[in-house]
Amino acid sequence: MSDPNLVHDNRTTTVSAGPREWLGLAVLALPTLLLAMDVTVLYLAVPHLTADLRPTGIEQLWIADIYGFMIAGFLITMGTVGDRIGRRKLLVLGASAFTAASLLAAFATSPLLLIIARALLGIAGATLMPSTLALISNMFRDVGQRAMAIGVWATCMSAGMAAGPIIGGLMLASFWWGSVFLLAVPVMALLLITAPVLLPEYRDANAGRIDLPSVLLSLATILPVIFGIKKAAEAGLSALPIAAIIIGTGFGWLFVRRQGALTDPLLDLRLFGNPTFRAALLILLFGLGTVGGIYLFITQYLQLVRGLTPLGAGLWLLPPAGALILASTLTPIIARKVEPRFVVAAALALATLGYLTLGFVDAVGGVPVLVSGFVLVYAGISPLMVLGTDLVIRTAPPEKAGSAAAMSETSMEFGVATGIAVLGVIGTAVYRADVAGAPVPGVQAGAQEAAKDSLGAADAAATDLPAHLGDAVLNAARDAFTNGLNTTALVCAAITAALTALALTLLRPTADEASTSR
């Protein structure tokens, strides 16, 4: 074989990992940290790019969540590509593409160009996400070591989400909003240098050919549904968004039918025969969806309602960040003694309590309540990423570890993106209804209509009004936004409460799984 590092991933071994594998895990932590940071770091930049680029409310939603949707849309495809051309090679190609797209985003001059750059970042990110987790599953074949390695991976993801607001706040205090995207350049440069040295190549000798119709059907499923959600957010449930969602669902049905008929499907539906596998994916999907949706409201509340600087908002988010990292670190240790389903259920119950706390935040003195509630949310959601991912990979056959890793990532990324979109629609609807229902006397209809679009638009409209009218418009808009945050948090509480029951009922390991987890 020409490449001594090439391994065909068609066998199972219990050989313990050595120093090279653990150093390789440190390399894989780089894109994991960066991709997690890229989700949260943008939130603090939203008010700044809004003031600079002046996006509409719907363009702002596209900027926020197109990244996650494109990752979700391409993850399964890129996982298959990695099986064929080599997972290390795909990782290196993806890192190069991510660097170029980050530069494009940093210097975008219009909302459309930024949306395009974020979409390209999502496609590039889709090459990185399955590669990191699939390489971990290949490098660490011992069950105990793999669980520990996945715990480190999840901790890095948690640390990235936590560090995003802090680093973003520091950069925004000194530089323009586009600087947050330049964080990718040195990180990806280090990855490109170290990956060929520390990461062995893995390729599945029995991987089938990529089925192009399946790729197209997967995109035809996701993108119309996204369009329908966005259009509904902009103009309500009219014929067009409903038709788009129905069309996407129809293509989804065709996609599932085709996968069942193929010898080498893009998505192996047989994996869903395991109830623990199905339940873990659902919990990852909806659990990450709640935190993704509420985070956007929290960062905007701190800046636009409470008037904090990006750095000030980032500092207030330090306690939740600490809870996130601590919970990710402790979860694998606790799971050695307690059955994972009980750990997941307890974590979800804690998150439910956190969301209920967020439901009582007010527009005047609500920062301590908000931070306290978000600490509980982060402490509860973090174990889902650790144990949910481990359960997905553990319950899949060894030869399907790459596909399982891609499905796990798809659930999380699609969950975050869907949460931003759906919960954003709910919060925006509450905001607009409150603003429309309580017009400020003496304010012209044009300014009142502009304020109804978003809190950022209300802030911009208030600058053109006399001081007393501007303050009245802003106070009404801030109260309306806070009400939207409260309503969204209560919806999240209902979702996580339902997931708690699901975890207790369905996350039951088989006898073999229970024995190998010890």
Image (cartoon, rainbow, N blue to C red):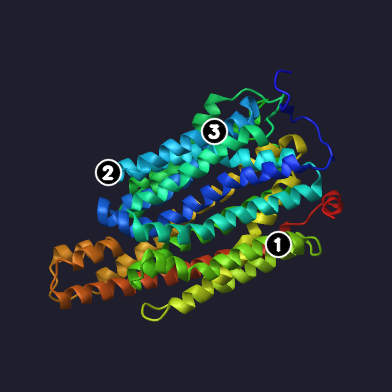
Residue at position x 67%, y 49% in the image: 278
Question: Could you tell me which quadrant the C terminus lies in?
Answer: bottom right
The number of numbered badges drawn on the structure is 3
- Residue beneath label 2, please? 109
The answer to whether mark 2 and mark 1 are in CB contact below 8 A is no
- How packed mark 3 is, by other alpha carbons closer than 10 Å (few <14, some 14-19, many 20 or more), is some
C-alpha gap between disc 2 and disc 1:
43 Å
C-alpha gap between disc 2 and disc 3:
39 Å
Q: Secondary structure at mark 3?
A: helix
What x and y, as percent, mark residue 482? 38, 72
Q: Secondary structure at mark 2?
A: loop
Instruction: Give, as a three-letter code, the residue at label 2.
Output: Thr
Question: Which mark sits nearer the N-terminus, 2 or 3?
Answer: 2
Residue at position x 56%, y 50% in the image: 33
What x and y, as percent, mark residue 70? 47, 41
Residue at position x 51%, y 44% in the image: 187
What x and y, as percent, mark residue 218? 52, 35
Residue 36 shown left or right of residue 176 in the figure: right
Q: Secondary structure at mark 1?
A: helix
- Residue beneath label 3, please? 254
Residue 268 shown left or right of residue 418 in the figure: right
- Residue beneath label 1, please? 331
- How packed mark 2 is, by other alpha carbons closer than 10 Å (few <14, some 14-19, many 20 or more), is some
Q: Find residue 506 and report its image quarter.
A: bottom right
**Residue 514 visible from this viewpoint:** yes
Question: Which mark sits nearer the N-terminus, 1 or 3?
Answer: 3
Residue at position x 53%, y 26% in the image: 213
Instruction: Give, as a three-letter code, the residue at label 3.
Output: Leu
Residue 109 shown left or right of residue 259 in the figure: left
